[in-house]
Image (tube, coloured by chain):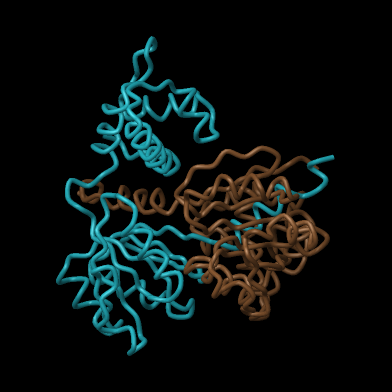
Chain colours: A cyan, B brown
Amino acid sequence: MEILPERTVERLSHYRRVLSKLLEINKEYIYSHEIAKLLHITPVQVRRDLMLIGHSGTLRKGYRIRELISLIGTIIDNPEKYKVAIVGFGKLGHALLNYLTENESNLHLVALFDTNPEKIGTTNNNVICYSVDRIPEIIKRYKIDMALLTLPPQFAQLTANQLVESGVKGIINYTSSILSIEGAFLEQYDMIASLEKVAYFTKPEFYL
Amino acid sequence: MEILPERTVERLSHYRRVLSKLLEINKEYIYSHEIAKLLHITPVQVRRDLMLIGHSGTLRKGYRIRELISLIGTIIDNPEKYKVAIVGFGKLGHALLNYLTENESNLHLVALFDTNPEKIGTTNNNVICYSVDRIPEIIKRYKIDMALLTLPPQFAQLTANQLVESGVKGIINYTSSILSIEGAFLEQYDMIASLEKVAYFTKPEFYL
């Protein structure tokens, strides 16, 4: 199968989560326009995404929810649980820890890293916090696939390099530092850009 | 001026931040391919975005950095500081507070809200934490424009409704609950989708 566009993968992840919730309340079938409405996108977009993963739907009753969830899983999930580390166990690292351990997903949080001696060695939601000095050792030992960077921005690039050298294949950078990485997929989450975007779209002149 | 596409606004925010850092180290001019390289996008994309805001650049020396920063500001910023509240002062709320007070931007964090009596009434980085019961009063009194939702997902929809009724024009939803909002711009940040996307793009078959 061809590699899907980034936005499609994000939306498939959304679809699955919404569909799982509907399944819980015993809904069996859904139309593309219903999915679209729940996610504030167009029905055309939904149909295009689902066609990309080889699903055409039955027009009369809509898509069968259980089937769709399982199809999305075969497309976007890894066959094995995906191993994740959080590097920088501050406020945001802690929020991510809670998020990952409280929400169901195919991701398995394996390690936390920090520099603070009071945090090193502690166990949080069953995950151990290690010293950043042990990054290469722990990443290799547990074959960690992905790292979430929530450390001070000035250490982000060096740490990212070390993670990739140790075998990490995907990084989400939550710091304000803009990274350059080779040999791994990089996603930058820029909070300020996200805030400035919302500010832009709520300018009073657009409401006149 | 026409409303710009969402992705363009995000990129303009990125450009500005990168350019400001370059200005600090006394760089005066920059080429579109240099901006592109720093942000891992194509030079064509950069040129298209800058043409959209009415800048064409001087080919010989590139764009004048100071001018570009100021032009981006006139396009995406509000003339007045934009007032922001964080609703839910847990780990993520705290991380956002630090982020907003440590990074320069046109955003002014005015209030925090929580339900925990130990947090209500405290001052954090000069920002007061109020009871969520006071949302309508405080939002109206300080004319708060934007709210960041970091509260438990089951309270997200009701709180969002209340915020919009009180005058909020933009909401960023960091909870796992999918919201439906009228009369305000809504941005959902879905951490799980972001993680699943990175997992997808690091599947071993794409490296064969």
Q: Residue furthest bottom?
A: A117
Q: Residue B28 at x, y = what percent?
A: 70, 73
Residue drawn at x 27%, y 28% is A66
The reply, left or right, for residue B116 in relation to residue A186 is right
User: Foreground residue, A205 or B6?
Assistant: A205
Image quarter where the N terminus of chain B lies is top right
The reply, left or right, for residue A120 in relation to residue B208 is right
Q: Residue furthest left?
A: A141
| Tag count | 0
Q: Residue B128 at x, y = what percent?
A: 67, 74
Instruction: Choose top left, top right, bottom left or bottom right for residue A109.
Output: bottom left
User: Foreground residue, A152 or B4?
Assistant: A152
As drawn, B188 above or below A59 = below
Q: Residue A134 at x, y = what percent?
A: 24, 82
Q: Residue B27 at x, y = what percent?
A: 66, 76
Residue drawn at x 38%, y 76% is A89
User: Foreground residue, A26 or B15?
Assistant: A26
As drawn, B174 above or below A76 = below
The reply, left or right, for residue A131 in relation to residue B111 is left
As drawn, A59 above or below A105 = above
Residue drawn at x 58%, y 48% is B187
Instruction: Choose top left, top right, bottom left or bottom right for residue B135.
Output: bottom right
